[in-house]
Amino acid sequence: MEFETQTIVRMCAYTGGGIAMGLGAVGAAIGEGYTASEANLAVSRSPKISGDIFKNMLVGQAVAESASIFALVIAILMLFLDIQTAHVLKASALFGAGLCIGFGAIGAGIGSGFPGGQACAGISRQPAAASQLTTNMLIGSAVCQTPAIFSMVVALMLIFIDFSNAPLYPTWAALIGAGLSTGMAAIGSGYGGGLAAGASCEGIARQPNSVGNVTTTMLVGQAVSQTPSIFGLLVSFILLFKTFPQSGALSASMALLGAGLCMGLGGIGPGIGNGMAAEGAVKWVARNMNHAGELMRTMLVGQAVSQSTAIYAMVVSLVLIFVI
Amino acid sequence: MGELGLIKQLIIPVWGHNIVLNLNVIGMTWIVIVFLIVFGIFSRWKKGIIPKPMQVMGELFVAQFYSLTEDAMDKEMAKTYGPLVCALFMFLLISNWLGIIPMLDEPTKDLNTPLSLGLMGFVIAHYAGIKSKGFKAYAKEYFQPIFFMAPLNIIGEISKIVSISFRLFGNIMGGSIIILVVSYLTYSLVLPPFLNVFFSLFVGTIQAFVFTMLTVVYISVQVK
Amino acid sequence: MAIEGVDIVKAAAFIGAGLSMGLGAIGPGVGEGMVAAKACEAIGKNPREAGLLTRTMLVGQAVSESTGIYSLVVALLLLFVV
């Protein structure tokens, strides 16, 4: 049974679009559900300000949804874009793009639900701090979208860059690996950033005058938690832009696919761990404001040490790309 | 997007027969060094009880990092290692901020710079460990749980260099690639300045601090 | 494209190295993060012991990182020895 190249490209575009939206819906749904459940609890605690809580819940959910909307944009692009290049590499690039944004939206979706939920709970506890809570929630959940934005950038590049000059045989694996690397590494960072943002909303509700310290600690913690996804992006870009010599051997392709998988999977755990560390620090900065400096220092050292496995994963991927 | 081709040159086969000198990186490193020397001279210029702005900045840096070192080690040790820690932080800070000026690159974007700084910290930490505990007690730590764990302990120590240097390299390199790609995608409209502030100033400061703190921590763990 | 036996073994070794380091990084990453979170909590409760707590945190993290180092060793063995 022979297929035309155009057919294969179309097939991969549809499959990739399905994967993108299917996986991309997981995270935002969980995150928004968390926000809604916390909002319900908050309304039951203080029904008088249910209007404020409801408004805050809707704003929080709207931000949490953006990761999923990125996935929707990519999926629609893949379904309706008229792709002219009839080259088999385009097929694997489209498939990789779907995987990338699909996985990448999971973490940010779940993560940005936490600040929304905690802000609703906080408003019911401390109605006077409602505006500070909403602002902090917006900052926190916007920052934890960053990994999803990284994966959208990689997905767009996979869709629009013309790869037809590259040799087919190792490059197909490099393109799928590039998608996997950024996409999966974004899961941990997005989730971890959400943990930190949630703790900061909870802390501000408890101690509204700590808002400056708490927001600063949250931003620093989130910036460090994003490191694994930046490593994933680095590996992806190397896989996208390095020209690999043609080789029919299976091992050459598998080395590149393995590099993407390694960095992708390796970024998940450290991202979540860094988020947990930031969560602990933010929580206690709110409770013990006088020692914010010491807490931030401990958080940074703890995060740096727990990142080291992501760095080993990056080293193994770089060895797989450059040495083998 | 031609500039992205630079990625390929990043990992150079150093063990080849020809020694590769990255003139760009050396030049940028010298810019940082000259800047720091000028800053040092100016902060000592006409020093007095009523300090000039430069003197305040210099004193702030030194006092902060002395107290950081004192927290991690004891007072005697802090006198020895405080200046090193302070200089390391200032060097890394200026290096990471250098990329915000057009036409200049961060020297930390090249793996060689963080790797050599990491190696320096590693050697200093182990020297401090041998000096304070004596060689026997130092060597004994490698056979800690049982004797055949020694190879794994040694690999664990060496992987510290890898993790400390690749962390800095990955962050700075990743940031500059993201800025390049986004500038290309948006035709340099609106977004790139904000990304520059985030990656060069914010992430650069955090990573310089993390690198310095980890060096302090490695030294203090070896000493205690 | 004929696939030879040696080639398939090499391909499996490369994918295996990637999976070994990738999956092996998840556990230590989360675990060390937990340690850091608890250390922050303890310092928040008792800031006077910050130095001791930080050192305990580092030792705990170093121990829980050892599985990550084992997977790094296995990955490098798969890449260069097999």
Image (cartoon, coloured by chain):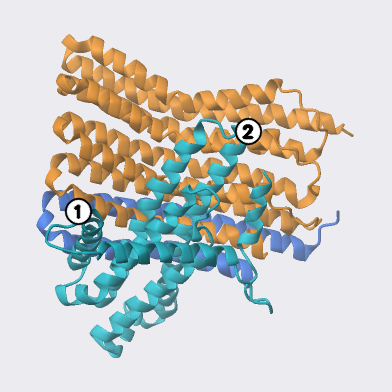
Chain colours: A orange, B cyan, C blue
Query: Residue drawn at (47%, 66%), measured in percent from left and top?
Result: B30
Question: In this view of the protein, can residue B138 be seen by the observer?
Answer: yes
Q: Chain of mark 1?
A: A
Q: Quadrant of residue A218?
A: top left
Query: Residue drawn at (58%, 70%), measured in percent from left and top?
Result: C77
Q: Which residue is mark 2?
A: A156
Callout 1 secondary element: helix
The image position of residue A90, as x and y in percent, is 75, 37
Q: Quadrant of residue B68?
A: bottom left
Instruction: Tell whether B79 sits left or right of A117.
Output: left
Callout 2 secondary element: helix
Farthest residue, direction front = B46
Query: Residue drawn at (75%, 36%), measured in percent from left and top?
Result: A91
Q: If the image is split into quadrants, where does the C terminus of chain C sit? A: bottom right
Distance in Å between CA atoms under marks 2 and 1: 42 Å
Farthest residue, direction right = A2
Query: Residue drawn at (66%, 24%), measured in percent from left and top?
Result: A77
Q: Looking at the rendered structure, which numbered label has been put on residue A294?
A: 1
Instruction: Tell whether B66 sits left or right of A225.
Output: left
Task: Reply above or below: C56 against A189.
Answer: below
